[in-house]
Image: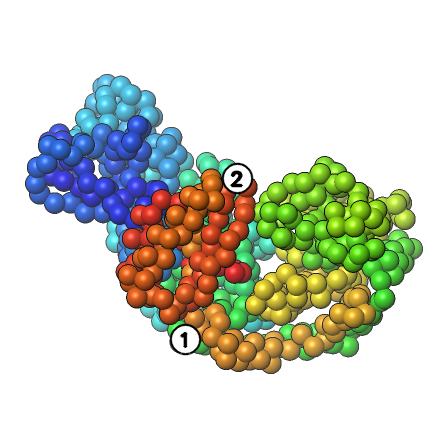
Amino acid sequence: MIVDVALPIPVGRSFSYRVPDELAPHVFELARVLVPFRYRETTGVVVALRDGEDEGLKPIAGVLDFFPLLSDELPALLRWSSSFYVTPGGIAFKHALPPAGDLERFLSVEPGGRADVDGLPLRKAIRRSGRTRLLQMFRDGLLGLRETLTGEAFAPPVPALPGSDGIESRKTLLIDSVKERLAHYSRIIPDHLERGGNVLILVPDYYAAGAWFARMLKETFGSRVLWFSSGTPVKQRMETWFRSRREGGHIVLGNKNCVFLPLHGLSLIIVERCDDDEYKNEEGFKFNAVRVAVERARLAKASIILGCAVCSIDAIHLARTNGFGISCNEWPAREGYAERTTSVSSPSTGEIIDHLSAEAGEAGREGTRVAIYAPRKDQGSYLKCHACRETLSCPGCGEALIYDREAGSLVCPGCGARLAYQGTCPQCGSSAIGFSRIGTDFIAEHLRKAHPYLTITRITGDSLRKEIAAIRRPRNKGAHVLVGTQSLSKLYDFPADRLLFAGWEDLRKMGGYRSEEKMHQVLLNLLDALTPRSIMSYSARKESVDPRDYLNISSFAEGELNKRREAQFPPFVRVFLLEARGKTAARADTTLKKILTVIVDRGLEAALLGTLPFERPPYHIRRVILKGDENLLRDTFEQLHDIPGVNIEADPISF
């Protein structure tokens, strides 16, 4: 027997191996096998089996699975995802399977008269008797496995009916406040649970919005709520994995990785805050969990709800083209936010800081809570020479530099280079250097100096768990100033009396073709989470923008869709970003030539938007941008992945 094995490496093709006779009875499609690759052994997934002998092939070293772990719609979903997101199948399959070590850690051999392994943890039984012998005993019915976390037998799950018996599958895009969304979910979920279906709820994060939703749902549904995400301990994660694959009646709550979780009788999928960029997986398998969830619901014949306070343009287009019912409740108008919003333009950054300081002082006197939003978390960016008016930029890639105060150095957000801060302008030598933009670090530090008696907490995405714990301390229940980025919009537990925007309009310079959309999303998500009584927006006079112009959800979406349709930008086309990487410029250029050769050979020249040199030390990078329909690279991506040094991303957030 010969098997084709997909390995979790960025190579388009699979690899053929010979199966020794003693392992042949235990090999099946989608089994994980241990194979020699280069100078080590690695784990891959069997994607094809065929009869034959080829002594020139290396033999597989072992079979890791006792039976298929991927069932129901998951194999089809993973194959679709691999093709749609132009990712080698081995990487996609690895993303959906628990590590073999984690699985074996929580399994034991059932008592059954086998004195040498009876009742042993599976790991110990493997060491004592060998994996192949245990596989044979399992196959012959002489050995069973038990889940130590649940006490149940570990066996192939009983096939479930598609969707949930008796419930018609529905597709809904719900745009409303978080209070109304949660109420809607709580009305819909019980019918699915009572019929034995599992409900999957995706949330964008674990510690803030996710933890809040978990607490709210547990108040209603108790122990039926299970957590599964990369932020949870492996023991809790594996217990959820065991329970959800075997039994129904659960609400499984998790982040983007949860979209590939095996779920018995999947009946309903809810994607909460479907506009959040956190659903785009940026490491390894670069998929978008919102789009994958829609496909999974289709394959499983399950209902799906995309819920949000403000929808992404991509999600609106996705809903329209996939037959969703769309419920857009203009909740900002219902809550009267236009009447509560004031916009102030200032001639300088210094005056904006003075306004923020005055608001913080008033909060201290009144014992109220103020939230201050700024788009950047650093001290400041766009360091500018006031003498020659030049912006300090990275010598490698030309990106504007930001200042890291703690390290006393300049950092390039583009290529990651770190440079010594000399205190003078490299163009004219002047020492008149200042920030043309300010970040949360700068604002928080200034307010602490001006109001040392106030509790001031910085809220950014890199340490939310610690910051939320600090806010919850009893001594922080009075006057409080929160200074943060869009992570403030995850704090559903902490309503603010006043919400202040400092430089919100700077998002226009940071979001590429999605800049207006990002301004709209940040504004409405902050209002949804913090429910402020009043809103003040402080902006530079020459760049002044009124938030009230962004409060109407429907009109904004239609305007943005029309602009993108005319320009032929996403979501009306797909963009594919190809990167040729090399430790030297010559190697990157060689890889680029190979990419362009494939593009020409495949007749894709019309889809080529251009190439762009880029530096990200220690790599030299050449970017290639292609634009076309969703099938543009379907028959080509495996050939491209076979070129060493190539990285491919479908639907990049910016390009």
Residue at x-position 29% and y-position 31%: 38
Q: CA distance from mark 2 to mark 1?
A: 43 Å
Residue at 28% x, 23% y: name it. 125
Q: Quadrant of residue 107?
A: top left
Q: Secondary structure at mark 1?
A: helix
Q: Nearer the viewer, residue 618 or 529?
A: 618
Q: Amino acid at mark 1?
A: Thr
The front one of 346 and 254 is 346
Front: mark 2 or 1: 2
Q: Is residue 528 above or below residue 69?
A: below
Q: Is residue 165 visible?
A: no
Q: Residue at x 29, y 39 (%)?
A: 44
Q: Which residue is mark 2?
A: 618
Name the residue type under label 2: Pro
Residue 321 tag number: 1
Residue 198 location, x and y as percent? 39, 56
Q: Secondary structure at mark 2?
A: loop
Mark with earlier residue (2, 1): 1
Query: What is the x, y in percent for residue 593?
Result: 37, 53
**Are circles 2 and 1 on residues that touch, CB within 8 Å?**
no
Q: Is residue 6 left or right of residue 18?
A: right
Q: Nearer the viewer, residue 340 or 16?
A: 16
Residue occupying image coordinates x 44% and y 44%: 586
